[in-house]
Each structure stands twice: as C-alpha cells, then as structure tokens.
Image (cartoon, rainbow, N blue to C red):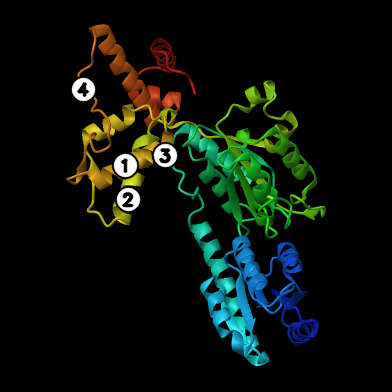
Amino acid sequence: MMKPRLLIVDDDEEIRSQMKWALNADYDVSLAGDRPSALASFRDRRPAVLLLDLGLPPRPAETTEGMALLTELLVLDRSTKVIIISGQNERTNALHAIAEGAYDFLPKPISMEELKVILKRAFHLTQLERELVDIRRQIQPDNFEGLLGTSPGMQEAFKTIRKVATTDASVLILGESGTGKEMAALAIHRRSPRHDGPFVPINCGAIPEALLESELFGHEKGSFTGAHTQRVGRIETAAGGTLFLDEIGELPTALQVKLLRFLQEQRIERVGGRESIPVNVRVVAATHVELRQAMATGRFREDLFYRLAVVVLNLPPLRERGGDIPLLAQAFLHKFTAADGQPKRQFDTSSLKALEQHPWPGNVRELENRVKRAVIMADGNRLSPADLELSPVSDTPAGNLKEARESLERKMVQDALRRAGGKITAAASELGISRPTFYELMEKLGLKRE
C-alpha cells in the first residue's frame, strides 16, 4: 500500500532532515526550503498534508513568504491540510494563518508525539472528504453541474461530456452567450481524473490586452512598471487541474502564438523570465464567435484552432430546446424560493405559454434572471407574465382560417416532437398519422428535421 504523501516546508535544513527521519516510516515525505521549491514539489506530487514554517527565504524573519505560499497552495487545492509550525512568539501569526485557511498549528519546540496525532487526524479527514465526494458522484452519476435538459440537443451534449471527461483531450465548447459553456466546462472537469485539482476560469475578452499576458503566464518581479513582486499566472495556478479559457475568440493574435507554444510543449515562461516552467494542465476553451470565419479573415490561427478543437461540444440555444424551457423555469423557481425563504410559488398557465413563446436571445442566463426577478417582485404565489416581464400570449389566433389552422398544426407537431424526445415515429403515432404524413406535414409547415 502506498504511504500518504507529506510535504515539509522549512528553511532550516537540519529541522527538515530530523522531521523526515521521524516521519518517514509512516509517510512518503518530500522536503522544500523556500516558496518556489515548495510550489514545484506540490504541483508534482500533490501531497494531501503540508507542514509549513511561515518564516521562509528571502525574508525568514518575516511571515510574508509563508503566508503567500499558504494562499497559493489553497488556490491550487482548497482541500489541502496545511499545518503551521510556529515559534512561541508567533502565535498571532499562526492564528492569522488559521483564519486564512490553514488546518492547524503546532508551536516550537515540536512534540513529535503531538505532531503524529495531528498528522493522523489530518490525513484521516482528507480521506473522509474524498470518499464523500466519490459517494456523491456515484449517487448522482448524471449530475452535469446544474445543466438540465431532455431535448435531443442537450442529450447529445451530455453524451459528449461523458465521453470526453475521462480523457485528457482539449475541448472547444461552442454556443451563444448564456447557454452554459462554463457550466459544461466545470462538468467536464468534475467528471475527469483531475477532479481533485483546481478549475481555473479566465475570460479572455474581459481583461485588457496589456494585462492579459501577465494574467495568463504570470510575471517576474521588475519585469514591467508596477511588477513589485513575482506573480504566478492562471496557467500555473491550474496545474494538475483544468484551465478554462472563455471567449477564446477574443484572444489577441500575439498571445495566440504563445498559447499555441504552451499547448505543444506544456511549458511556459513568465513575462520577464527566462526559466522554462513545465505545467501539467488540461485546457477547455469556449467561444460564441464563429472561429472558422475568424480563421478565414486571419483573426484566429488555424493551428491553434485544431490544437483546441480535439473534441467540439455544441450547446444549443434555448429557443431550439423546446420542452427544456418549462423544465429549467421550474428548477430556477425552486432554487430561488428555497434560497430566499420565500413561500412556495408556481407559474400560472399564461406564464408557461409566455415562457414557451419568448425567443430567449439571452438564452438560459436570461431565463434565470427573469425567474429570479419574478420571485422578488411578485405579489402573490402565482407568477404572471408581467412578473417575468413577458407579454401574455393570446389564445385566439390572428389572421384568416388557413393561418389559424397552420398555427394549430405547427403547435401540435412541435408539442408531439417535444414529448417524444424528437423521435418521429413516436410523435406521428401520438397524432394518429403515419410517419410519411408526419414528414409531409413538417415540410409544409417549414419545420426542420433534427
């Protein structure tokens, strides 16, 4: 059986060696004497528990390096148990570290028996937490991080997520704004072998171009005006986990070259640095931009596209998801009434009709916002179209008899397809007509075949 991994971080080599000698029988011990080597060891070995002395070089008399390391470790993996080793006169600093997320602290001189008890407890807690995550994953095998849908388009998306999540392949998620691209990326991460590692998102279109390179790749102290300290970028932060590059179509051309090099070599250089740093990370990208058109105009590199699009996941717009609209609306209604302690609410008939008829230019995000507003603003327990800021749908068809008949036929065909999950034979049977007749009816009404 493999021994649990333990990392000891202390600037005193003699103390490190003594502690390793005392703990080596029970743990797979690794050592580090400063912040950079500790981060490198952590990314490489992913120990569940660390012993950390806050006084590290280059300023061992201060706690800045130790506190910075604590923050970086917990960003990389929030479940890591960091045990602070502190001197008698450093109790205030140790308590501050506890407030920042450290698991426990032990004063110097160290009682080895007490340390062994604390370590045993920390590793046991880590094991319990991991078992709980696995149990939840088994109980909810089709939990797609809040993504819901029975429509054919969403079922196909779920099928792709199931297949690609178990691999390390790069994924490109395509879909309009508000369709749930980040939720899909998180579902891929949570179902992957990297689920214990960090999920680090960055919106490539929301950060000024002058800052984006530093945000992605990090920078060295003094590399530019205002770079007062070394900074680890998002790519390094995601080591051992998943990096989610949202709105990749907005990435400047110069950075596309640097990102392509990273994807090819799995190594980066910080801004102002000369060291080549290996980073083991999975990349998932997303965009609402038509990248093939962007490639044709030279705004997006073709070689980068094929590096990112090993697998392409398409998320359909809400207007093409039929029966998913009431399903999602009910889920949001339950979520917001439960969260705000509101009385039980329900949609009236006119609200459900209005929801189904609305074109949803903002997709699922718009639906969520409208339901949240309705829960806050509604006076009664039944939500009306006005509460959702939607226009009521008239039951009386406009126009002549021919238009009214076609409108009714279209609604019946669409409803039958929705209830049948897009299956033509089942929908035709429900309406009491043959499959060829059903196809003829779809063509007459201008409805596309899935």
Looking at the rendered structure, the secondary structure element under dot 4 is: loop
Residue 371 — which label? 1
- The amino acid type found where label 4 is placed reads Asp
Graded by Cα atoms within 10 Å as few (under 14), some (14 to 19) or many (20 or more), the crowding at tag 2 reads some
Mark closest to the chain's N terminus, 2 or 4: 2
* Labels in figure, total: 4
Residue 136 — which label? none
Residue 395 — which label? 4
Name the residue rendered at 42%, 13% in the picture. 446
In the rendered structure, the answer to whether residue 21 lies left or right of residue 334 reads right
Graded by Cα atoms within 10 Å as few (under 14), some (14 to 19) or many (20 or more), the crowding at tag 3 reads some
Quarter of the view holding residue 364: top left
Instruction: Name the mark nearer the viewer: 3 or 4.
Output: 3
Instruction: Name the mark nearer the viewer: 1 or 4.
Output: 1
Graded by Cα atoms within 10 Å as few (under 14), some (14 to 19) or many (20 or more), the crowding at tag 1 reads many
Image location of residue 245, percent across then percent down: 61, 43
Name above or below for residue 184 compared with residue 74.
Answer: above
Mark pair 2, 1: CA separation: 8 Å
Residue 336 — which label? 2
The residue under label 3 is 365
Name the residue rendered at 63%, 64% in the picture. 72
Mark closest to the chain's N terminus, 3 or 4: 3
Name above or below for residue 277 compared with residue 440.
Answer: below
Q: Which residue is at the front of the view, 129 or 47? A: 47
Q: Are marks 2 and 1 in contact (CB under 8 Å)?
A: yes
Name the residue rendered at 27%, 37% in the picture. 388
